[in-house]
Amino acid sequence: MHIHLNDDDISQMPESLRRLFLNWLPEYLKTKNSWFEQKPVNQHRQPEVSPTQLLLNLESQTLKDKIDNSHVRLSQLFDAGITKRGMAVRVKLKREEAKKKGREYIDNLEISKKGTILYNGQEFDKPSPLATKMTGGAANGWEYIEVRKNDEWVSLDKLREIWRSTND
């Protein structure tokens, strides 16, 4: 089985999975050309993990649940009442881009009537493609985008955690 991941896919992973993946990847790349061994897994012991294997513990939820919760869309936050139409949105710029533009944020955005964010006529239901477009390089939109909620700026990541806590 082959799985192809790009920077956006990795940035959208839940933090614990992303950390596990990024720790595993360098070891895998060192042994990339070696043959893979398939060993039976002993149910009573923790299996030994070679650099060519990534051990994932998905016992607490089914794989379908993990996939459904890992790809949260902005419209899901909207449908749950966590965001509302017209809420102000800003995108934090990366250091180099902020120096070029002379500011830290692009802040002329808002939540649309569908719960998405509109930018230059394009509708975004996932934050990372928007953050990537606005920051000039791969960016985790859940961390780079903030919404004005109850008179304070809150990262989309925190709002996504609120959504997940009620949808697990």
Image (cartoon, rainbow, N blue to C red):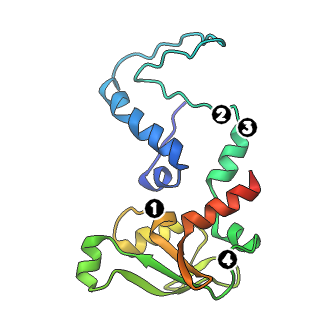
Mark 1 vs mark 4, CA separation in Å: 19 Å
Disc 1 residue type (three-letter): Asn
- Give the vertical position of 159 relative to 42 (above or below): below
Residue at 76% in and 70% down: 80
Q: Label 3: which residue?
A: 62
Q: Label 2: which residue?
A: 58
Q: Nearer the viewer, residue 70 or 44?
A: 44
Q: Is residue 34 left or right of residue 41?
A: left
Q: Secondary structure at mark 2?
A: loop
Q: Label 4: which residue?
A: 83
Disc 4 residue type (three-letter): Thr
Residue 130 location (% of width, % of height): 48, 72
Q: Quadrant of residue 60?
A: top right
If you read the primary sequence from the N terminus, does the residue marked by circle 3 or circle 1 appear first? Answer: 3
- Tell which tag, 1 or 4, sits nearer the viewer: 4
Residue at 54% in and 10% down: 39
**Badges 4 and 3: C-beta atoms under 8 Å apart?**
no
Q: Label 1: which residue?
A: 140
